[in-house]
Protein backbone atom coordinates (compact mmCIF):
# COMPACT_ATOMS: atom_id res chain seq x y z
CA UNK A 1 0.00 0.00 0.00
CA UNK A 2 2.98 2.25 0.38
CA UNK A 3 3.50 2.04 -3.46
CA UNK A 4 0.24 3.36 -5.01
CA UNK A 5 1.57 3.32 -8.56
CA UNK A 6 2.17 -0.42 -8.26
CA UNK A 7 -1.34 -1.01 -6.93
CA UNK A 8 -3.05 0.94 -9.71
CA UNK A 9 -0.92 -0.79 -12.33
CA UNK A 10 -2.39 -4.09 -11.09
CA UNK A 11 -5.89 -2.65 -10.98
CA UNK A 12 -5.86 -1.14 -14.46
CA UNK A 13 -4.16 -4.14 -16.03
CA UNK A 14 -6.53 -6.67 -14.42
CA UNK A 15 -9.55 -4.54 -15.36
CA UNK A 16 -8.49 -4.33 -18.99
CA UNK A 17 -7.72 -8.07 -19.13
CA UNK A 18 -11.10 -8.89 -17.51
CA UNK A 19 -12.96 -6.62 -19.94
CA UNK A 20 -11.20 -8.26 -22.88
CA UNK A 21 -11.95 -11.76 -21.52
CA UNK A 22 -15.63 -10.87 -21.02
CA UNK A 23 -15.92 -9.52 -24.58
CA UNK A 24 -14.50 -12.70 -26.13
CA UNK A 25 -17.42 -15.03 -24.98
CA UNK A 26 -19.91 -12.44 -26.18
CA UNK A 27 -18.28 -12.49 -29.62
CA UNK A 28 -18.16 -16.30 -29.65
CA UNK A 29 -21.81 -16.62 -28.63
CA UNK A 30 -22.86 -14.11 -31.28
CA UNK A 31 -20.91 -16.04 -33.89
CA UNK A 32 -22.44 -19.39 -32.89
CA UNK A 33 -25.98 -18.00 -32.98
CA UNK A 34 -25.45 -16.69 -36.49
CA UNK A 35 -23.62 -19.81 -37.68
CA UNK A 36 -25.34 -22.87 -36.16
CA UNK A 37 -23.76 -25.00 -38.88
CA UNK A 38 -20.23 -24.65 -37.45
CA UNK A 39 -18.73 -28.09 -37.00
CA UNK A 40 -16.88 -27.31 -33.71
CA UNK A 41 -19.79 -25.61 -31.89
CA UNK A 42 -19.35 -27.47 -28.56
CA UNK A 43 -15.69 -26.53 -28.49
CA UNK A 44 -16.63 -22.87 -28.90
CA UNK A 45 -19.07 -23.01 -25.96
CA UNK A 46 -16.47 -24.67 -23.71
CA UNK A 47 -13.82 -22.15 -24.74
CA UNK A 48 -16.24 -19.29 -23.99
CA UNK A 49 -16.74 -20.69 -20.44
CA UNK A 50 -13.00 -20.94 -19.98
CA UNK A 51 -12.38 -17.32 -21.09
CA UNK A 52 -15.20 -16.07 -18.85
CA UNK A 53 -13.64 -17.83 -15.86
CA UNK A 54 -10.29 -16.27 -16.68
CA UNK A 55 -11.90 -12.80 -16.66
CA UNK A 56 -13.39 -13.49 -13.22
CA UNK A 57 -9.96 -14.38 -11.80
CA UNK A 58 -8.61 -10.98 -12.80
CA UNK A 59 -11.56 -9.22 -11.17
CA UNK A 60 -10.83 -11.18 -7.96
CA UNK A 61 -7.22 -9.99 -8.20
CA UNK A 62 -8.43 -6.37 -8.00
CA UNK A 63 -10.86 -7.23 -5.14
CA UNK A 64 -8.16 -8.95 -3.07
CA UNK A 65 -5.83 -5.93 -3.18
CA UNK A 66 -8.06 -4.36 -0.47
CA UNK A 67 -10.11 -7.24 0.97
CA UNK A 68 -7.89 -10.35 0.88
CA UNK A 69 -10.81 -12.70 0.07
CA UNK A 70 -8.56 -15.53 -1.06
CA UNK A 71 -11.14 -18.29 -0.49
CA UNK A 72 -13.47 -16.84 -3.15
CA UNK A 73 -10.51 -16.40 -5.46
CA UNK A 74 -9.58 -20.04 -4.92
CA UNK A 75 -13.13 -21.13 -5.91
CA UNK A 76 -13.01 -19.06 -9.09
CA UNK A 77 -9.57 -20.41 -9.96
CA UNK A 78 -10.82 -23.97 -9.39
CA UNK A 79 -13.70 -23.29 -11.79
CA UNK A 80 -11.25 -21.85 -14.31
CA UNK A 81 -9.00 -24.88 -13.97
CA UNK A 82 -12.01 -27.21 -14.44
CA UNK A 83 -12.92 -25.41 -17.66
CA UNK A 84 -9.35 -25.05 -18.97
CA UNK A 85 -8.29 -28.70 -18.73
CA UNK A 86 -11.22 -30.14 -20.87
CA UNK A 87 -10.80 -27.25 -23.26
CA UNK A 88 -7.14 -28.07 -23.76
CA UNK A 89 -7.82 -31.79 -24.11
CA UNK A 90 -10.66 -31.22 -26.63
CA UNK A 91 -8.55 -28.74 -28.56
CA UNK A 92 -5.73 -31.27 -29.03
CA UNK A 93 -8.30 -33.91 -30.00
CA UNK A 94 -9.81 -31.66 -32.67
CA UNK A 95 -6.47 -30.45 -33.95
CA UNK A 96 -6.23 -33.03 -36.84
CA UNK A 97 -9.71 -32.09 -38.02
CA UNK A 98 -8.91 -28.41 -37.78
CA UNK A 99 -5.74 -28.96 -39.79
CA UNK A 100 -7.83 -30.76 -42.44
CA UNK A 101 -9.87 -27.64 -43.07
CA UNK A 102 -8.70 -26.34 -46.46
CA UNK A 103 -6.94 -23.04 -46.61
CA UNK A 104 -7.88 -20.36 -49.18
CA UNK A 105 -4.95 -21.39 -51.36
CA UNK A 106 -6.04 -25.02 -51.18
CA UNK A 107 -9.62 -24.04 -52.05
CA UNK A 108 -8.37 -22.03 -55.01
CA UNK A 109 -6.31 -24.98 -56.21
CA UNK A 110 -9.31 -27.32 -55.88
CA UNK A 111 -11.50 -24.80 -57.72
CA UNK A 112 -8.94 -24.66 -60.51
CA UNK A 113 -8.91 -28.48 -60.71
CA UNK A 114 -12.72 -28.56 -60.75
CA UNK A 115 -12.85 -25.96 -63.51
CA UNK A 116 -10.37 -28.01 -65.53
CA UNK A 117 -12.48 -31.16 -64.97
CA UNK A 118 -15.64 -29.32 -66.05
CA UNK A 119 -13.91 -28.03 -69.17
CA UNK A 120 -12.76 -31.58 -69.95
CA UNK A 121 -16.30 -32.87 -69.36
CA UNK A 122 -17.72 -30.20 -71.68
CA UNK A 123 -15.27 -31.22 -74.36
CA UNK A 124 -16.25 -34.89 -73.95
CA UNK A 125 -19.95 -33.95 -74.09
CA UNK A 126 -19.38 -31.92 -77.25
CA UNK A 127 -17.58 -34.86 -78.82
CA UNK A 128 -20.39 -37.17 -77.71
CA UNK A 129 -23.02 -34.87 -79.25
CA UNK A 130 -21.08 -34.81 -82.48
CA UNK A 131 -20.90 -38.63 -82.47
CA UNK A 132 -24.66 -38.85 -81.72
CA UNK A 133 -25.43 -36.49 -84.60
CA UNK A 134 -23.20 -38.52 -86.88
CA UNK A 135 -24.93 -41.72 -85.79
CA UNK A 136 -28.36 -40.12 -86.36
CA UNK A 137 -27.28 -39.11 -89.87
CA UNK A 138 -26.10 -42.66 -90.54
CA UNK A 139 -29.35 -44.11 -89.14
CA UNK A 140 -31.41 -41.67 -91.23
CA UNK A 141 -29.46 -42.70 -94.31
CA UNK A 142 -30.03 -46.37 -93.43
CA UNK A 143 -33.76 -45.77 -92.92
CA UNK A 144 -33.94 -43.98 -96.24
CA UNK A 145 -32.09 -46.83 -97.91
CA UNK A 146 -34.52 -49.31 -96.34
CA UNK A 147 -37.44 -47.20 -97.54
CA UNK A 148 -36.06 -47.10 -101.05
CA UNK A 149 -35.54 -50.85 -100.97
CA UNK A 150 -39.10 -51.33 -99.70
CA UNK A 151 -40.50 -48.98 -102.34
CA UNK A 152 -38.49 -50.80 -105.01
CA UNK A 153 -39.80 -54.12 -103.80
CA UNK A 154 -43.34 -52.73 -103.68
CA UNK A 155 -43.21 -51.19 -107.15
CA UNK A 156 -41.62 -54.34 -108.53
CA UNK A 157 -44.45 -56.48 -107.19
CA UNK A 158 -47.10 -54.01 -108.33
CA UNK A 159 -45.55 -53.72 -111.79
CA UNK A 160 -45.51 -57.51 -112.08
CA UNK A 161 -49.19 -57.79 -111.11
CA UNK A 162 -50.32 -54.86 -113.25
CA UNK A 163 -48.41 -56.09 -116.28
CA UNK A 164 -50.30 -59.37 -116.02
CA UNK A 165 -53.60 -57.48 -115.71
CA UNK A 166 -52.80 -55.18 -118.62
CA UNK A 167 -51.80 -58.16 -120.75
CA UNK A 168 -55.12 -59.86 -120.00
CA UNK A 169 -57.12 -56.69 -120.75
CA UNK A 170 -55.19 -55.55 -123.83
CA UNK A 171 -54.99 -59.09 -125.23
CA UNK A 172 -58.72 -59.66 -124.98
CA UNK A 173 -59.52 -56.20 -126.39
CA UNK A 174 -57.18 -56.82 -129.31
CA UNK A 175 -58.93 -60.13 -129.99
CA UNK A 176 -62.28 -58.29 -129.99
CA UNK A 177 -60.92 -55.81 -132.52
CA UNK A 178 -59.66 -58.66 -134.72
CA UNK A 179 -62.97 -60.59 -134.70
CA UNK A 180 -65.73 -58.12 -133.82
CA UNK A 181 -68.44 -60.12 -135.59
CA UNK A 182 -67.89 -63.35 -133.64
CA UNK A 183 -70.44 -62.69 -130.91
CA UNK A 184 -69.71 -65.74 -128.76
CA UNK A 185 -65.98 -65.13 -128.68
CA UNK A 186 -66.43 -61.38 -128.20
CA UNK A 187 -68.59 -62.03 -125.14
CA UNK A 188 -66.01 -64.44 -123.74
CA UNK A 189 -63.12 -62.04 -124.41
CA UNK A 190 -65.07 -59.16 -122.89
CA UNK A 191 -65.79 -61.27 -119.80
CA UNK A 192 -62.06 -62.10 -119.49
CA UNK A 193 -61.17 -58.40 -119.75
CA UNK A 194 -63.82 -57.55 -117.14
CA UNK A 195 -62.43 -60.22 -114.81
CA UNK A 196 -58.92 -58.78 -115.17
CA UNK A 197 -60.33 -55.33 -114.46
CA UNK A 198 -61.93 -56.64 -111.29
CA UNK A 199 -58.58 -58.09 -110.20
CA UNK A 200 -57.02 -54.69 -110.84
CA UNK A 201 -59.72 -53.08 -108.73
CA UNK A 202 -58.86 -55.38 -105.86
CA UNK A 203 -55.16 -54.58 -106.16
CA UNK A 204 -55.68 -50.81 -106.19
CA UNK A 205 -58.11 -51.17 -103.31
CA UNK A 206 -55.34 -52.89 -101.34
CA UNK A 207 -52.94 -50.04 -102.10
CA UNK A 208 -55.47 -47.34 -101.22
CA UNK A 209 -56.37 -49.08 -97.98
CA UNK A 210 -52.71 -49.23 -97.04
CA UNK A 211 -52.21 -45.56 -97.91
CA UNK A 212 -55.23 -44.66 -95.66
CA UNK A 213 -56.76 -42.67 -98.53
CA UNK A 214 -59.69 -44.95 -99.34
CA UNK A 215 -62.96 -44.73 -97.48
CA UNK A 216 -63.95 -48.04 -95.92
CA UNK A 217 -67.68 -48.48 -96.44
CA UNK A 218 -68.66 -50.49 -93.37
CA UNK A 219 -71.84 -52.51 -93.84
CA UNK A 220 -73.36 -55.56 -92.20
CA UNK A 221 -71.81 -58.71 -93.75
CA UNK A 222 -72.89 -62.32 -93.39
CA UNK A 223 -69.48 -63.96 -93.02
CA UNK A 224 -70.76 -67.41 -93.96
CA UNK A 225 -72.34 -66.19 -97.21
CA UNK A 226 -69.20 -64.14 -97.97
CA UNK A 227 -66.90 -67.14 -97.63
CA UNK A 228 -69.18 -69.47 -99.54
CA UNK A 229 -69.48 -66.90 -102.32
CA UNK A 230 -65.66 -66.64 -102.42
CA UNK A 231 -65.05 -70.38 -102.67
CA UNK A 232 -64.53 -70.44 -106.44
CA UNK A 233 -62.37 -67.30 -106.35
CA UNK A 234 -60.28 -68.77 -103.55
CA UNK A 235 -59.77 -72.08 -105.38
CA UNK A 236 -58.75 -70.32 -108.57
CA UNK A 237 -56.39 -68.01 -106.67
CA UNK A 238 -54.53 -70.63 -104.63
CA UNK A 239 -54.23 -72.95 -107.63
CA UNK A 240 -54.03 -76.73 -107.84
CA UNK A 241 -50.99 -77.11 -105.56
CA UNK A 242 -53.02 -76.35 -102.43
CA UNK A 243 -55.80 -78.61 -101.22
CA UNK A 244 -58.29 -75.92 -100.18
CA UNK A 245 -60.83 -76.86 -97.54
CA UNK A 246 -63.55 -74.42 -96.52
CA UNK A 247 -65.22 -74.99 -93.17
CA UNK A 248 -67.95 -72.48 -92.30
CA UNK A 249 -69.60 -72.95 -88.91
CA UNK A 250 -73.30 -72.38 -88.21
CA UNK A 251 -74.89 -69.22 -86.82
CA UNK A 252 -71.95 -66.92 -87.47
CA UNK A 253 -74.15 -63.87 -87.59
CA UNK A 254 -73.02 -60.65 -89.22
CA UNK A 255 -70.06 -58.31 -88.79
CA UNK A 256 -69.56 -54.69 -89.81
CA UNK A 257 -66.77 -54.15 -92.31
CA UNK A 258 -66.07 -53.11 -95.87
CA UNK A 259 -67.09 -56.21 -97.90
CA UNK A 260 -64.57 -55.62 -100.68
CA UNK A 261 -61.69 -55.08 -98.27
CA UNK A 262 -62.67 -58.03 -96.06
CA UNK A 263 -62.85 -60.28 -99.12
CA UNK A 264 -59.46 -58.97 -100.27
CA UNK A 265 -57.95 -59.54 -96.80
CA UNK A 266 -59.12 -63.17 -96.76
CA UNK A 267 -57.84 -63.67 -100.30
CA UNK A 268 -54.41 -62.25 -99.36
CA UNK A 269 -54.17 -64.52 -96.33
CA UNK A 270 -55.11 -67.54 -98.44
CA UNK A 271 -52.44 -66.70 -101.04
CA UNK A 272 -49.86 -66.25 -98.27
CA UNK A 273 -50.81 -69.68 -96.91
CA UNK A 274 -50.38 -71.20 -100.38
CA UNK A 275 -46.97 -69.55 -100.81
CA UNK A 276 -45.89 -70.97 -97.44
CA UNK A 277 -46.34 -74.49 -98.89
CA UNK A 278 -44.00 -74.59 -101.92
CA UNK A 279 -44.48 -78.34 -102.22
CA UNK A 280 -48.24 -78.12 -101.79
CA UNK A 281 -50.42 -79.21 -98.92
CA UNK A 282 -53.73 -78.69 -97.17
CA UNK A 283 -54.99 -75.11 -96.77
CA UNK A 284 -57.89 -74.74 -94.32
CA UNK A 285 -60.13 -71.68 -94.20
CA UNK A 286 -62.37 -71.91 -91.17
CA UNK A 287 -64.94 -69.56 -89.69
CA UNK A 288 -66.67 -70.07 -86.35
CA UNK A 289 -68.52 -68.02 -83.76
CA UNK A 290 -66.71 -67.34 -80.49
CA UNK A 291 -68.89 -65.59 -77.93
CA UNK A 292 -69.42 -62.05 -79.24
CA UNK A 293 -67.05 -62.30 -82.20
CA UNK A 294 -66.39 -64.27 -85.36
CA UNK A 295 -63.01 -65.97 -85.87
CA UNK A 296 -61.79 -66.49 -89.46
CA UNK A 297 -58.75 -68.78 -89.51
CA UNK A 298 -56.43 -69.51 -92.41
CA UNK A 299 -54.34 -72.58 -91.54
CA UNK A 300 -51.46 -73.86 -93.63
CA UNK A 301 -49.02 -76.73 -93.06
CA UNK A 302 -46.04 -74.97 -94.61
CA UNK A 303 -42.59 -73.87 -93.56
CA UNK A 304 -43.82 -71.76 -90.63
CA UNK A 305 -42.19 -68.65 -89.19
CA UNK A 306 -39.70 -67.96 -86.44
CA UNK A 307 -40.68 -65.75 -83.52
CA UNK A 308 -38.60 -62.89 -84.93
CA UNK A 309 -40.44 -63.04 -88.26
CA UNK A 310 -43.84 -63.25 -86.52
CA UNK A 311 -43.00 -60.09 -84.56
CA UNK A 312 -42.34 -58.23 -87.83
CA UNK A 313 -44.91 -59.90 -90.05
CA UNK A 314 -47.49 -57.11 -89.67
CA UNK A 315 -45.02 -54.37 -90.62
CA UNK A 316 -45.83 -52.72 -93.96
CA UNK A 317 -43.49 -53.81 -96.78
CA UNK A 318 -41.98 -56.61 -94.67
CA UNK A 319 -41.80 -59.85 -96.65
CA UNK A 320 -39.61 -62.93 -96.77
CA UNK A 321 -40.38 -63.46 -100.46
CA UNK A 322 -37.93 -62.55 -103.17
CA UNK A 323 -38.15 -59.37 -105.30
CA UNK A 324 -41.17 -59.40 -107.60
CA UNK A 325 -42.92 -62.11 -105.60
CA UNK A 326 -44.49 -60.08 -102.80
CA UNK A 327 -45.15 -56.52 -101.71
CA UNK A 328 -45.29 -57.08 -97.95
CA UNK A 329 -48.74 -55.48 -97.78
CA UNK A 330 -50.98 -58.54 -97.48
CA UNK A 331 -50.74 -59.14 -93.73
CA UNK A 332 -50.55 -55.45 -92.81
CA UNK A 333 -53.62 -54.75 -94.98
CA UNK A 334 -55.55 -57.65 -93.36
CA UNK A 335 -54.56 -56.35 -89.93
CA UNK A 336 -55.77 -52.87 -90.90
CA UNK A 337 -59.14 -54.26 -92.05
CA UNK A 338 -59.56 -56.21 -88.80
CA UNK A 339 -58.69 -53.17 -86.67
CA UNK A 340 -60.98 -50.90 -88.71
CA UNK A 341 -63.84 -53.32 -87.93
CA UNK A 342 -63.04 -53.14 -84.21
CA UNK A 343 -61.33 -56.53 -84.16
CA UNK A 344 -57.80 -57.90 -84.20
CA UNK A 345 -55.48 -60.27 -86.04
CA UNK A 346 -53.28 -62.95 -84.46
CA UNK A 347 -50.47 -65.07 -85.91
CA UNK A 348 -49.51 -68.45 -84.42
CA UNK A 349 -46.65 -70.21 -86.16
CA UNK A 350 -44.06 -72.92 -85.56
CA UNK A 351 -41.08 -73.39 -87.92
CA UNK A 352 -41.53 -76.53 -89.96
CA UNK A 353 -45.11 -77.12 -88.81
CA UNK A 354 -47.17 -74.31 -90.33
CA UNK A 355 -48.98 -71.09 -89.54
CA UNK A 356 -52.45 -70.08 -88.36
CA UNK A 357 -53.61 -66.53 -89.01
CA UNK A 358 -56.85 -65.60 -87.23
CA UNK A 359 -58.97 -62.53 -87.89
CA UNK A 360 -61.25 -61.68 -84.97
CA UNK A 361 -64.25 -59.54 -85.95
CA UNK A 362 -66.90 -58.39 -83.44
CA UNK A 363 -70.42 -59.55 -84.23
CA UNK A 364 -72.94 -56.85 -85.11
CA UNK A 365 -76.34 -56.47 -83.53
CA UNK A 366 -78.83 -59.14 -84.50
CA UNK A 367 -81.17 -56.48 -85.88
CA UNK A 368 -78.70 -55.59 -88.67
CA UNK A 369 -79.25 -57.28 -92.01
CA UNK A 370 -76.36 -58.15 -94.31
CA UNK A 371 -76.25 -56.02 -97.43
CA UNK A 372 -75.29 -57.12 -100.90
CA UNK A 373 -73.47 -54.54 -102.99
CA UNK A 374 -73.76 -54.93 -106.78
CA UNK A 375 -70.68 -56.50 -108.32
CA UNK A 376 -69.15 -56.18 -111.76
CA UNK A 377 -71.20 -58.98 -113.11
CA UNK A 378 -74.53 -57.81 -111.74
CA UNK A 379 -77.28 -57.63 -114.31
CA UNK A 380 -78.54 -54.13 -114.91
CA UNK A 381 -82.17 -53.30 -114.64
CA UNK A 382 -83.85 -50.41 -116.38
CA UNK A 383 -83.89 -47.20 -114.32
CA UNK A 384 -87.16 -46.09 -112.79
CA UNK A 385 -86.80 -42.82 -114.67
CA UNK A 386 -84.07 -41.16 -116.67
CA UNK A 387 -82.08 -38.35 -115.11
CA UNK A 388 -80.28 -35.29 -116.37
CA UNK A 389 -76.64 -35.84 -115.38
CA UNK A 390 -73.78 -33.33 -115.47
CA UNK A 391 -70.59 -35.40 -115.81
CA UNK A 392 -67.31 -33.67 -114.81
CA UNK A 393 -64.02 -35.46 -115.45
CA UNK A 394 -60.72 -34.18 -116.83
CA UNK A 395 -59.82 -37.51 -118.49
CA UNK A 396 -61.57 -37.59 -121.93
CA UNK A 397 -61.40 -41.38 -122.30
CA UNK A 398 -62.86 -41.98 -118.83
CA UNK A 399 -65.48 -39.28 -119.42
CA UNK A 400 -66.55 -40.81 -122.73
CA UNK A 401 -66.78 -44.33 -121.29
CA UNK A 402 -68.85 -43.22 -118.29
CA UNK A 403 -71.08 -41.05 -120.49
CA UNK A 404 -71.75 -44.04 -122.77
CA UNK A 405 -72.62 -46.16 -119.71
CA UNK A 406 -75.06 -43.52 -118.51
CA UNK A 407 -76.66 -43.06 -121.93
CA UNK A 408 -76.92 -46.83 -122.25
CA UNK A 409 -78.94 -46.80 -119.00
CA UNK A 410 -81.31 -44.21 -120.45
CA UNK A 411 -79.93 -41.09 -118.79
CA UNK A 412 -79.25 -37.73 -120.48
CA UNK A 413 -75.66 -36.60 -120.07
CA UNK A 414 -73.92 -33.23 -120.36
CA UNK A 415 -70.13 -33.38 -120.19
CA UNK A 416 -67.62 -30.93 -118.67
CA UNK A 417 -63.87 -31.37 -118.58
CA UNK A 418 -63.14 -29.26 -115.47
CA UNK A 419 -64.70 -27.35 -112.59
CA UNK A 420 -64.95 -23.87 -114.17
CA UNK A 421 -66.64 -25.30 -117.27
CA UNK A 422 -69.12 -27.15 -115.04
CA UNK A 423 -69.97 -23.92 -113.19
CA UNK A 424 -70.65 -22.17 -116.50
CA UNK A 425 -72.97 -25.00 -117.57
CA UNK A 426 -74.83 -24.81 -114.26
CA UNK A 427 -75.77 -21.20 -115.06
CA UNK A 428 -77.79 -22.48 -118.04
CA UNK A 429 -79.07 -25.85 -116.76
CA UNK A 430 -80.44 -27.51 -113.65
CA UNK A 431 -79.40 -31.19 -113.69
CA UNK A 432 -80.85 -33.82 -111.40
CA UNK A 433 -77.41 -35.15 -110.56
CA UNK A 434 -73.79 -34.09 -110.86
CA UNK A 435 -71.20 -36.82 -111.21
CA UNK A 436 -67.66 -35.60 -110.68
CA UNK A 437 -64.08 -36.73 -110.26
CA UNK A 438 -62.04 -35.68 -107.24
CA UNK A 439 -58.47 -35.30 -108.55
CA UNK A 440 -58.70 -32.61 -111.25
CA UNK A 441 -56.24 -29.80 -112.04
CA UNK A 442 -57.05 -26.28 -110.93
CA UNK A 443 -60.29 -26.91 -109.05
CA UNK A 444 -60.61 -30.37 -107.51
CA UNK A 445 -63.88 -32.19 -107.02
CA UNK A 446 -64.29 -31.23 -103.36
CA UNK A 447 -63.85 -27.52 -104.14
CA UNK A 448 -66.28 -27.78 -107.06
CA UNK A 449 -68.85 -29.60 -104.90
CA UNK A 450 -68.64 -26.98 -102.14
CA UNK A 451 -69.09 -24.20 -104.71
CA UNK A 452 -72.07 -25.92 -106.32
CA UNK A 453 -73.82 -26.66 -103.01
CA UNK A 454 -73.66 -22.97 -102.12
CA UNK A 455 -75.65 -22.25 -105.30
CA UNK A 456 -77.81 -25.38 -105.51
CA UNK A 457 -78.01 -27.01 -102.05
CA UNK A 458 -80.48 -29.69 -103.22
CA UNK A 459 -78.35 -30.98 -106.10
CA UNK A 460 -77.44 -34.65 -105.75
CA UNK A 461 -73.69 -35.40 -105.91
CA UNK A 462 -71.92 -38.61 -106.88
CA UNK A 463 -68.12 -38.75 -106.75
CA UNK A 464 -66.56 -41.21 -109.17
CA UNK A 465 -62.88 -41.28 -108.32
CA UNK A 466 -59.88 -43.51 -107.96
CA UNK A 467 -58.12 -41.28 -105.44
CA UNK A 468 -60.74 -40.43 -102.83
CA UNK A 469 -59.48 -38.12 -100.14
CA UNK A 470 -62.47 -38.84 -97.96
CA UNK A 471 -61.62 -36.26 -95.31
CA UNK A 472 -61.38 -33.45 -97.88
CA UNK A 473 -64.70 -34.48 -99.47
CA UNK A 474 -66.46 -34.74 -96.11
CA UNK A 475 -65.12 -31.35 -95.03
CA UNK A 476 -66.29 -29.75 -98.28
CA UNK A 477 -69.77 -31.27 -98.64
CA UNK A 478 -70.52 -32.25 -95.02
CA UNK A 479 -71.35 -35.84 -95.95
CA UNK A 480 -73.90 -34.83 -98.64
CA UNK A 481 -72.30 -36.92 -101.40
CA UNK A 482 -71.97 -40.55 -102.38
CA UNK A 483 -68.59 -41.95 -103.45
CA UNK A 484 -67.94 -44.70 -106.02
CA UNK A 485 -64.44 -45.98 -106.59
CA UNK A 486 -62.98 -46.34 -110.05
CA UNK A 487 -63.13 -48.60 -111.92
CA UNK A 488 -66.88 -49.03 -111.64
CA UNK A 489 -69.22 -51.27 -113.58
CA UNK A 490 -72.23 -50.03 -115.48
CA UNK A 491 -74.44 -52.01 -113.09
CA UNK A 492 -72.91 -50.44 -109.98
CA UNK A 493 -73.14 -47.01 -111.56
CA UNK A 494 -76.80 -47.48 -112.47
CA UNK A 495 -77.61 -48.80 -109.00
CA UNK A 496 -75.94 -45.81 -107.31
CA UNK A 497 -77.89 -43.34 -109.50
CA UNK A 498 -81.12 -45.25 -108.89
CA UNK A 499 -80.53 -45.03 -105.13
CA UNK A 500 -79.77 -41.30 -105.27
CA UNK A 501 -82.78 -40.52 -107.43
CA UNK A 502 -85.05 -42.50 -105.12
Image: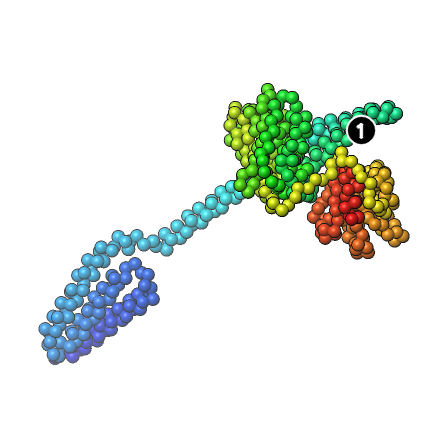
Q: Residue at x 30, y 58 (%)?
A: 39
The residue beneath circle 1 is 190
Q: Is residue 415 left or right of residue 468?
A: right
Give the mark count. Answer: 1
Q: Nearer the viewer, residue 460 or 91?
A: 460
Outermost right residue:
428
Q: Position of residue 90 (x, y in %)?
A: 21, 58
Q: Is residue 216 left or right of residue 282?
A: right
Residue 265 appears in view: no
Q: Position of residue 33 (x, y in %)?
A: 31, 67
470 vs 316: above or below:
below
Image quadrant where residue 178 sits? top right
Tell me the SS state at disc 1. helix
Q: Position of residue 60 (x, y in %)?
A: 16, 74
Q: Nearer the viewer, residue 469 or 252?
A: 252
Q: Residue at x 74, y 51 (%)?
A: 480
Image quadrant where residue 279 sits? top right
Image quadrant where residue 5 sits? bottom left
Q: Quadrant of the N terminus?
A: bottom left
Q: Position of residue 208 (x, y in %)?
A: 69, 39
Q: Residue at x 55, y 36 (%)?
A: 346
Q: Nearer the viewer, residue 258 or 275?
A: 258
302 vs 56: above or below:
above
Residue 73 appears in view: yes
Amino acid sequence: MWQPELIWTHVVSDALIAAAYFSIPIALITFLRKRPDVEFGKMFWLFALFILSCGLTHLMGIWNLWHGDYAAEAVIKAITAAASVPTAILLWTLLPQALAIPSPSMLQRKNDELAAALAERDAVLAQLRAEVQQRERIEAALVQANKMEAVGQLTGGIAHDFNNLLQAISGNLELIQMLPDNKDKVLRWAANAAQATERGTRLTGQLLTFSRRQRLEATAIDVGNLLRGMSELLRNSVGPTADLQLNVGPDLGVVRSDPTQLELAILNLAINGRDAMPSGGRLLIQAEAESDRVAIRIVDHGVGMTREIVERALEPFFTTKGPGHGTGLGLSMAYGVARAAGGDLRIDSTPGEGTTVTMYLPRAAETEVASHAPGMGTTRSAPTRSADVLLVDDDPEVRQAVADMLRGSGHRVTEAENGPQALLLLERMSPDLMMLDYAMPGMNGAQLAANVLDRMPDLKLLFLTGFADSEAIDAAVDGRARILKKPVSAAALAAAIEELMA
